[in-house]
């Protein structure tokens, strides 16, 4: 996979969702075959990040579906149940819409999305399977992770699901979580890595570079004064933002990606701001991105945040960051649709 392909894969470029079939307390997306209310293999999960562990589970289920000659349907929940049931829910690796786009990009045939509420959470495992799952997804085989929780507060698990399978004629496969480096791959592990600024290690578990979305806002103007076009991006506090520091990134708007040196968090050498923010010095950029939605793709951490004694020291450090980006990520923009280098000058 070349550089442009990897950027495109990371931000789910080109992955679109069709108009869903609205079912009241759920939505059904038909992607590659007419699979609503059809016998199928299904995989249940939240899929936050759609990391390598999730993809391994999907790959096993896909082989099962191919052998049985039936579609593969994923079943998930929006919002993430922890956002509804607990205070201080963990930062998300993908927004709800991006989770569905990631599943579509992976290649499942259909997606059933339950609208997760406290009322939904109060259903027993039996009530859920019999009244919510099987009427939409008449599964012949169900795949879950070994830690999958079912029913009110997730208190019931794969044992109950297997019992219901015997009653209703579907097989149940509970899989041990996939491991990397001797540890289980999980969204929690990936969040911890990002919280330490270890974006390269997080990428190895995600199977892609991590990205966050935000809106470009007017900033302090100091970056332009240094001679570097700067995008000040306001972030969503719910997203998993890497540890404060300076990173080599790509900033993506539409089908165009620019290499960038990005400062995450408060800039210690200037006044503080409110809310999560990043400042991106864009290479090969000219124009106006104000009020535009962009994605920032994290490739490598260059250094920690620090306060400089003088403006000259700050400029020298910023120039060093930009030089690293220029040498390793490029000096002009990339077209994700054509896969070609663009010339913005």
Image: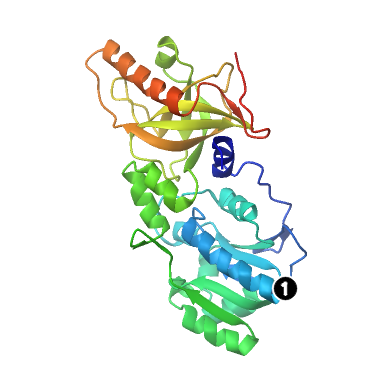
Q: In the picture, residue 39 is in which quadrant?
A: bottom right
Residue placed at 43% from the left, 65% from the top? 178
The residue wearing badge 1 is 69
Say if 8 sits above or below 220 in the image.
Answer: below
Looking at the image, which is closer to me, 12 or 323? 323
Regarding residue 214, the answer to whether it shows in the image is yes
Within 10 Å of disc 1 (Cα), the crowding (few <14, some 14-19, many 20+) is few
Residue placed at 29% from the left, 29% from the top? 305
Residue 98 place in picture, x, y as percent = 57, 48
Q: Is residue 251 left or right of residue 262?
A: right
Looking at the image, which is closer to me, 6 or 195? 6
Residue 133 place in picture, x, y as percent = 63, 73
Looking at the image, which is closer to me, 278 or 102? 102
How are the residues colored? rainbow
**Residue at the extreme left of the image, as rendered:** 309
Q: Is residue 188 left or right of residue 167?
A: left
Residue 161 place in picture, x, y as percent = 53, 81
Q: In the picture, residue 336 is in which quadrant?
A: top right
Residue placed at 46% from the left, 77% from the top? 157
**Which quadrant of the rendered structure holds the N terminus?**
top right
Looking at the image, which is closer to me, 206 or 121? 206
Q: Give the SS element for disc 1.
A: loop
Residue 50 place in picture, x, y as percent = 52, 55
**Residue at the extreme bottom of the image, as rendered:** 167
**Which quadrant of the rendered structure holds the C terminus?**
top right
């Amino acid at each position: 996979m070349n550089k442009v392909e990897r950027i495109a894969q990371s931000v789910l470029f080109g992955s679109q969702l069709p108009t869903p079939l609205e079912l009241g307390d759920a939505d059904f997306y038909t992607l590659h075959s007419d699979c609503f209310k059809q016998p199928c293999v299904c995989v249940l999960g939240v899929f936050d990040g759609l990391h390598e562990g999730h993809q391994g589970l999907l790959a096993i289920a896909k082989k099962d579906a191919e052998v049985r000659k039936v579609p593969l349907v994923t079943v998930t929940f929006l919002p993430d149940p922890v956002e509804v049931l607990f205070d201080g829910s963990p930062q998300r690796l993908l927004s709800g819409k991006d989770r569905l786009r990631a599943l579509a990009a992976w290649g499942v045939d259909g997606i059933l999305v339950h609208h997760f509420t406290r009322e939904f959470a109060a259903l027993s495992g039996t009530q859920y399977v019999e009244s919510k799952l099987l009427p939409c997804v008449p599964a012949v085989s169900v795949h879950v992770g070994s830690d999958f929780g079912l029913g009110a507060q997730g208190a019931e698990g794969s044992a109950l699901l297997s019992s219901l399978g015997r009653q209703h004629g579907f097989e149940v496969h509970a899989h041990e979580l996939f491991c990397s480096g001797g540890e289980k791959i999980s969204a929690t592990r990936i969040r911890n890595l990002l919280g330490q600024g270890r974006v390269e290690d997080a990428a190895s578990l995600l199977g892609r570079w991590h990205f966050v979305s935000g809106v470009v806002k007017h900033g302090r103007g100091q970056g332009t004064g240094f001679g570097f076009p700067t995008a000040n991006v306001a972030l969503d506090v719910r997203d998993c933002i890497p540890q404060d520091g300076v990173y080599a990134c790509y900033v993506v708007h539409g089908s165009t990606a620019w290499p960038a040196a990005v400062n995450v968090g408060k800039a210690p050498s200037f006044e503080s701001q409110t809310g999560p923010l990043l400042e991106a010095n864009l290479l090969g950029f000219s124009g106006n991105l104000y009020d535009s939605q962009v994605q920032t793709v994290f490739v490598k951490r260059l250094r920690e945040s620090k306060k400089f004694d003088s403006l000259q020291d700050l400029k020298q450090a910023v120039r060093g960051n930009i030089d690293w980006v220029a040498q390793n990520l490029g000096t002009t923009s990339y077209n994700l649709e054509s896969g070609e280098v663009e010339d913005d000058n």
